[in-house]
Image (tube, grey):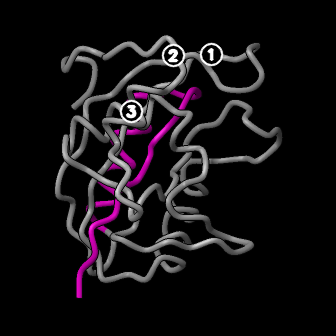
Amino acid sequence: MKTDAFIGLGSNLQEPVAQLARAVAELAALPTTTLVAQSPFYASSPVGPQDQPDFVNGTAWISTELEPHALLDQLQAIEQAHGRERLEHWGPRTLDLDLLIFGNQVLDDDRLTVPHRELPNRDFVLQPLLDLNPGLKLPDGTTIANLRAQCPDNRLRKLPPRDYP
């Protein structure tokens, strides 16, 4: 049985727009997975250390037969293929893929928390989620629209479509 999942995408190194575009294509190629849609890309200020370039962010909506931890393994493999190094918490990166929402499941273990615990604080994830599905809700019934209305501003700027495939 397929489950709808939403993936957060972020990059601020080595041509971030190209990194995200390649990652979306790689998500679409995952086993037993279909890409439903991708959001527009947005630029935003970095969270954490400010002595790094702005980020480019977006989200992807997939339908998958993978279980949550198997999907997480696939996401981390894609990050590694893009040269992801985990040197500094919230530091610069070539690619960051976060499993934001996985159907109506709630998970919290040493490897994975779904829905993503920082979701309410990330306008650069909430707005792209709204672009994909304006009626999207968390498993507890909280709407993404309500979270977005209460979210702190992170200087979010929508990139023109010509800046990405």
Left/right placement of residue 13 relative to residue 4 reads right
Q: Position of residue 96 (x, y in %)?
A: 56, 45
Q: Quadrant of the N terminus?
A: bottom left
> How far across and down, in percent of the image, does residue 102 sit?
39, 67
- The answer to which of 41 and 20 lies nearer the viewer is 41
Residue range corresponding to the magenta coloring: 1-29
Q: Mark 1 is on which residue type? A: Pro
Tally of marks: 3
Write the residue at 19% across / 40% down.
134
Note whether 131 is above or below 133 in the view shown: above
Is disc 2 surrounded by few (<14), some (14 to 19) or many (20+) residues within 10 Å? some
Q: From the image, state whether disc 2 or disc 1 is nearer to you.
A: 2
Report how far apart the C-alphas of labels 2 and 1 lie in the structure: 17 Å
Dot 3 and dot 1 residues touching (CB under 8 Å): no
> Helix or strand or loop: what does disc 1 sit on?
loop
Q: Amino acid at mark 3?
A: Ala
Residue in the foreground of this view, choosing between 153 and 54: 153
According to the picture, the residue beneath numbered tag 3 turns out to be 18
| Mark 3 nearby-residue class (10 Å; few <14, some 14–19, many ≥20) | some
In the image, taking residue 119 as reference, residue 34 lies left or right, namely: left
Residue 131 covered by magenta stretch: no
